[in-house]
Image (cartoon, grey):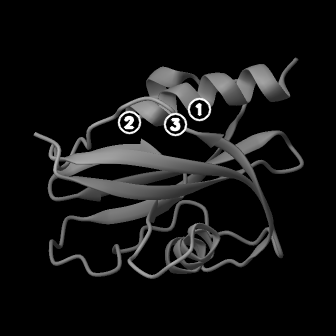
Amino acid sequence: MVTRFNLRVYGIVINDQGEVLLSHERRNKFEFIKFPGGGVELGEGILDALKREFIEELGVYIDSARLFYLNEFYQASVFKPEDQIISFYYLVTLKLNEINIGVINKPLGSMDSSDFERVEWLALTDLTPDQMTFPIDKVVVTELKESLLK
């Protein structure tokens, strides 16, 4: 039974080589691949949350962000089935493109020593929905490819 909304915000970063930034993470013994981003905190705006997540996860600042996708269908959380996920996806440009690729970081607030976060660039042409872990991300990959690779 769904008892609450869970707002999520993600950034889609595409570099000059046509590669998209992906985040590989492990939390609570569950590994997943997603776009960089995360949860919106109480009292926080959607864009403020995106900016905070990029600083926390990547150590970079967002220069601009344009709304690309918002899920209009029901999606239960993979982690907490009682949560209904509402996700905002933004096309993001960064102030500097200096991102530490392949560096393994411990997620902020994690208590499990096996948890990690690392990012990679992958050619948008090579990205498929099946590579993403979460259902909404799979839809976004399809939308992204249809929109940008016409």
Q: Which mark is residue 61?
A: none
Q: Residue at x 56, y 55 (%)?
A: 10
Q: Are marks 3 and 2 in contact (CB under 8 Å)?
A: no
17 or 34: nearer the eye?
Answer: 34
In percent of width and height, residue 76 lies at 26, 38
- Say which residue label 1 marks: 140
Please report the residue visible at 64 percent of the width from the left and 69 percent of the height from the top: 47
In front of the other: 52 or 45: 45
> Which tag, 3 or 1, sits closer to the chain's start?
3
Q: Residues within 10 Å of mark 3 (few under 14, many from 20)?
A: some
Q: Position of residue 98 (x, y in %)?
A: 75, 72
- Specify which label sits upstream in the sequence, 3 or 2: 3
**In-front residue for pair 134/23:** 134
Q: How many marks?
A: 3
On the image, numbered disc 2 is attached to which residue? 134
* Sequence-first tag of 2 and 1: 2
